[in-house]
Amino acid sequence: MASQKFERRSSSTEPEFTTASLPDIVFMLLIFFMVATVLRETDIKVRTQLPQAEALTKIDQKRLISKVHIGPLKRGENKGSTAIQIDDALIENRRTIRQIMYRKLQEQPKLIVSLKVDRDSEMQIVNEVQQELREANALRINYSSNREGPPPS
Amino acid sequence: MAGLLDKRRQNREEASIPTAGMADIAFLLLIFFLVTTTINVDTGIGMTLPPKLKPEQTPPPVKERNLLKILVNAQGDVLVEEERARVGEIRDRVKKHVLNFGQDSDLADSPDDAVISIKTDAQTPYSTYIEVLDEVWMSYREIWDRIAQTNRLPGPEGGTAGLDQQYSSYREYYTSLEPEEDNKIRDAFGAQISIAEPDTGE
């Protein structure tokens, strides 16, 4: 009696998951990651190992940011001299910073200048850049730094 | 002849592109983008530089007692009000200075009057400067944390900070703010941190 009951239950066809919608799910994830990905558009020619800090603020609006990289030039193994890079170009004459920043400020009045300064830099160059930023009236700055944690080797 | 062709066509199955491999291709692309994506949010210490002074302008006077001077020299040594100090001490010194409310005659009159001035040497390492600046900001953060937790302003008068609820930390309050909303804690208890003018080589 009991065995009959069991036999009746088992069906002839093998139970299967429907995998037809799997590509849809995968595509959705794919599209999300494609949209979220930001490919680095500028080639950074200076080394910027950021300092670590605790009192951090996030800048959510990416389009307000203009980055200024300050650090030693990447030249193979040995460190080059300290240089400033804005967007794609190295800055030869520091006086040009005020013109660049003034132009950027015209386009984006709420400009935030993100200073990406190498931790081994000296304050002199940072001060010089800050004076230039004051000349251009680009007063909102951000000392880019990482969350405190184990120091990167 | 035509009839024969027709017959053959009828027998043929409808052509279709095999879609079984589609998922594999999509997975491959997905994995590529997963690996290359870095969802990084820019973090840092926000500051506002003082506006450029006109030549005839003099910097606004600050009473000596309201000013807490922090000097960092080329070796990374720290002087707080002309005394050697460790970086770790700065946080408490700043808090004591800001939350003095006129008690000690050497410290600030009120939090609104208090100014923290950081001055660096040309050869000061940038990392030390950030460390010092971070400590100063953290002491304000700790004060703001207390305001967010208790919804009361510090000091003898105290009074409510006007928050709609109590938060576990300033960060939680800050993230709950709408983009256009005013930051009530910072409006009520602002931080005045000044980066001193660098010496121009005298």
Image: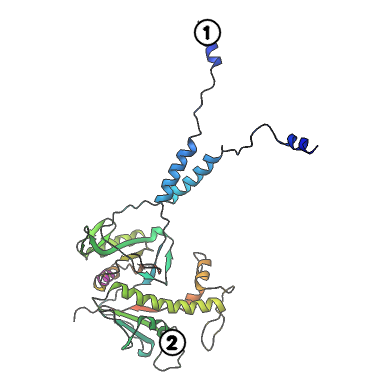
- The picture places residue A80, in percent across and down from the top left corner, at 20, 63
- The picture places residue A57, in percent across and down from the top left corner, at 43, 68
Q: Quadrant of the C terminus of chain B?
A: bottom left
Q: Nearer the viewer, residue B193 or A26?
A: A26
Mark 1 Cα-neighbour bin, 10 Å: few <14, some 14–19, many ≥20: few
A12 w.r.t. A82: above or below: above
Q: Which mark is residue B49?
A: none
Identify the chain of the residue marked 1, using the numbered disc in the image.
B
B80 w.r.t. B187: above or below: below
Identify the chain of the residue marked 2, using the numbered disc in the image.
B
Q: Within the image, what quadrant is residue A125 found in?
A: bottom left
Secondary structure predominantly adopted by residues drawn in magenta: helix
Judge whether residue A82 is colored magenta.
no
Amino acid beneath label 1: Leu
- The picture places residue B111, in percent across and down from the top left corner, at 45, 84
Q: Which mark is residue B96?
A: 2
Residue B183 seen in the current view: no
Secondary structure, mark 1, is helix
Q: Nearer the viewer, residue B115 or A19?
A: A19
Q: Nearer the viewer, residue A38 or A1?
A: A1
Which span is picked out in magenta? A126-131
Residue A18 seen in the current view: yes
Q: Nearer the viewer, mark 2 or mark 1?
A: 1
Q: Is residue A104 left or right of residue B13?
A: left
Residue at x 45%, y 49% (from the top left corner): A33
- The picture places residue B115, in percent across and down from the top left corner, at 38, 83
Residue at x 41%, y 83% (from the top left corner): B94
Secondary structure, mark 2, is helix
Amino acid beneath label 2: Lys
Q: Which mark is residue B4?
A: 1
Of marks 2 and 1, which one's residue comes earlier in the chain? 1
